[in-house]
Structure formats: C-alpha cells, structure tokens
Amino acid sequence: MRDGVGPSIAIRRCALAAVLALACGAAPGAPPAAAPGGIAWHAAASDAEVDRAFAAARAAGKPVFLYWAAVWCPPCNQVKATLFSRPDFVERSRAFVPVYVDGDKPGAQKVAARFKVQGYPTMILFKPDGTEITRLPGEVDPERYLIALSAALEAQVPVRELVARALAGKTIEPQQWRLLAFYSWDTDQEQVVAQKELASRLDELAAKAPTALPEVRQRLALKSLALRSQSGTVNTGVVDAGRRLVDQVLQDPSSVALHADVLTAYAGSAVRWLAPAGEERRELATRWDAALVKLLAGAAQLSKASRIDALDARVALWKLIGGADDLAPQQRAQVLTEVARIVAGTTDRYERQAVVPAAAHVLREAGLIDESDEVLKAELPRAVAPYYHMLGLAGNAKKRKDAAAALHWYEQAWRRSEGPATRLQWGANYLGNLIELAPGDVARIEKTAKGLIGELQPKAETFYERNQRALARISARLQQWQGQDPERRRAVTRIRQQLASTCAKLPAKDAGRANCTSLLAA
C-alpha cells in the first residue's frame, strides 16, 4: 500500500467474512489417520517393514507404489483430499501394493535415505523386485496424474532406461514418451540425471520427441526452461528458443491447461529470465497473465489449490507489469475477493491444509499482511497441523520487522509441532531465526540448541536425510554465530559436548554414528 491508498477497511472485512465464518466453524471429519484412508496401505517406517511389502508384491506379481509424506505437508494433504479419495484411484490401487512412509515415524528417515527421497510428497513406482520404474508428479491435476500412473503401470520400463534409449535415438512408444514428459523431475534426486545436466538433457529429450506428440515436446522444454530460470544463467540462443516456446504455449488455451502447474509455479522467474527488462518484460508478463485469466475462467476442473497457485502467479506478474512491488488498489481488492471465495469454498479439512497457507502467502505477497494473519489465525483451531500455519504468522511478523512477534511464532510452531523429524526441522528453523534476530541472547540460543539435541533419540536411524540436514544447518549456524566471542564459544562448546554424548551411544559401525560425529567436525 502506497501513501495509505488501498482497499477500504469495509471492503477488506466483507471479503474476509466468508473465510472467517467457515474457518471458525467446527472441524469436519475425524482427525488424520496414520495413513491416508480408502486404500489398503502398508504402513512402513523401517527397512524390515518395507522389505515385507516388497515380498508381498513379489508374491502377488504386482508393482509397489511408495508414498513418502508428512501429516503437516500441504501438498500431501492436497493429494489425500483430491487424488487418494477418488474412487477411480482407489480402484487403480488394486493393481499395485501401496506403501505409506510417514516421515515422522521412527526409522523413516533411514528409509528415505534408502530410496533417495527428500521432499514431501514423493511417489515412486517400483517393479516387484525393487527396480524403480518412475517417480510420479504430485503437482498435476488428478486426471493427468492417473494418466501418468497408467502409463507407468503399462510401460514397466524404468525411466532411467527410457531416457538412455531416447537420447540414443532409439524408438520408444508414445505412452513411454508421456511417461518421460510427466516424470517428477523435481524429486528425481539424481536417480536418472545429474542435477547439473538436467536442463540440457530435458532439452535433448524435447528435441528427440516425435513431432506427433507436441504436448510431450512442450512439457519437457518447459521443465528445462523452468530450471534455467531458477539458475539465472543466460544464453542468448537458449533464451530465444524459450521465448518461441512460451509464445506457442500461451496462445493455445489447451496447452496452457495441460502445463498449468509449470506456468503458475515459474511465472515470475520465467518472465524475468526471458525478458530482462523494459517494455519486452511488461508485454510478456501481460500475455502470460491473460493466459492465466482464460485458464481460470475456462477450467472448471481446476482444484482450489491450483486456483490459489494461479492467483499467486498473477500477483508476481502484476508486479512485473507495474514495475514495482506494490499492487494497485483494485488489484489488492481483487486478490482479497478471490482468496476469500476460494478459501470459503474449500470445505475438506485436508484440502484446507494446502489451500489456507497458500492463500495467506498470496495475501502477504499482495501487501495484505494483516489480512494474511487473520486467515491463518482463524484456521488454527481447526487445522490438520496448526504449527505449519504458525510459520506463516512468523513470516508475516518478520516481514513487518517485528522480531519479538516473529520469534514468538517460530517458537510456538516448534513447541506445537509433532513427530521427531518435524520437531527437529521446526526447531532448527526457530534456532536459525533466533540467531538472526536476537544474536545477543546467548542463554536463549544455548537453551534452544540443547533442547533440540536433548530430543534426539540415540539411535542410528535418527541421523539420516531430513534430520541430518537440519542438524547440519544447526551446526553451521552455531559455528558462524560463535565467532571469536568468548561467551558464545563456551556456549557452543557445551552444545557440542551434549551432541558428542548422544553420538557416543550409537552403534560404532553404523553409518548413523558416522553421520552424527561428522556434525562435530569444526
């Protein structure tokens, strides 16, 4: 808001009324179960449990569908609400052995290391013998997801092998090309292609895909463009090819609908990469925005989460069109109205776990921080995982430069969080912000770090994947924070001694102990 100009208080309150009326109501349905409902999931949080599921798959001659998730994760709740609850998906699940790994169960992080999974959700299809076939995208609409799943079940050829065949110029079937196009490259974790080579390999695949499959060529090239826009590396020839691709996609509503997830997730970064400045940038952003308007008007099947994502993209595009971070008053009013309508129309408790924090983020990006707070606070009593929403409240306070409020919410998010991996991740986040916003509070920082270490189970499986990354962040932040200050150095020494005591309790030959002791290296 500039010079106090913006939507009136009356407009804001009226637009939020529907949100707050629904958000403060009674929570429908039962609390979330340990595994998503409606499907015969094999819950697994250890190598032995995973091995039993694969044994069952071999006995039945079925592939294995592994779902890696967390209770708080917004896209996991979105998948649960809009995909796993569908009768056609439940029916399709009879063709495979479904395995659910909750990242907060003891031993789950070691399972994650085994299968090279990090981000929630990750969904992988395996042959009964354990050979990975494909990783399925969690960001596409349910209908497209089912098509990708069917392609994987029918192909039974690992994506790694398909990529090698395609790059070698060998013939692969159209269904197999579609499998490559809708592979979850975002969660590949270098199982198929090294990260540094991924953009180039996607371009090569796009060029080799049959001209009779334009949607495959577009999809692969768009994923490459998205990666390049994130890296910031500019090559004139590649940028020119990207502009031609985007021009082709944006003028075709069916292509926009097919690739909506990419076009919304990377709108801002892609426009900045394709058009560095000036009128060219404004023109491209305007056309991109117009394509999203048509998408929202004509795609009745778009989920509530997808509509919020599109609105988020539009906010980013409006800033590029206007050349400033502040939106016009009418744009803010439109954001407020759209957010209120979408949130009020989201009645499924699990889908709200995805929609509400995303909606609050859009409000914050639009400069409506107070309204963002209202939506988040109203949701706390009914949320699947309210501690996730508390991170949004902390971020809002931090943007206001209210350090005390920000630290209050970061701490509350940690203390209210559930599950060992989540508590460590949330605690590391709180500690990092404590070091940033209150670096002189040595006693509070030491107490928090010791509290985190004190919760660690002295078991080897504790020191893998997300846990290990969170601990590495803690170690690095503390190392940087102590500097040459004697009081801080003594505090860090005491913290390290506590961690060393935990490491010493682990089995000597287990990799978990090596992971633990590696954190002690100064």
Image (spheres, rainbow, N blue to C red):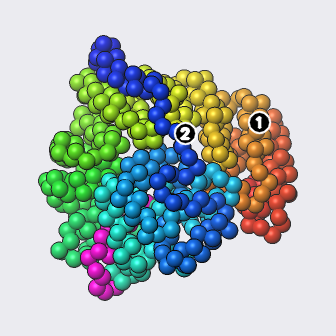
**Whole-percent x, y for residue 136 in the image:** 41, 63
Which residue appears at 24% of the width and 60% of the height? 242
Q: Which residues are magenta?
A: 167-186
Give, as a three-letter code, the residue at label 2: Pro
Mark-to-mark CA distance, 1 and 2: 36 Å
Of the numbered discs in the image, which one, if any, rests on residue 446?
A: 1
For disc 1, the neighbor class at 10 Å (few under 14, some 14 to 19, many from 20) is: some
Residue at image position (41%, 32%) is 360
Quarter placement of the N terminus: top left
Residue 31 is marked as 2
Mark 2: give few (<14), some (14-19) or many (20+) Cα within 10 Å.
few
Left or right: 152 as drawn, with respect to 334: right
Q: Nearer the viewer, residue 73 or 259?
A: 73
Q: Is residue 21 above or below residue 78?
A: above
State whether residue 314 appears in this view. Answer: yes
Q: Which mark is residue 201?
A: none
Give the mark nearest the N terminus, 1 or 2. 2
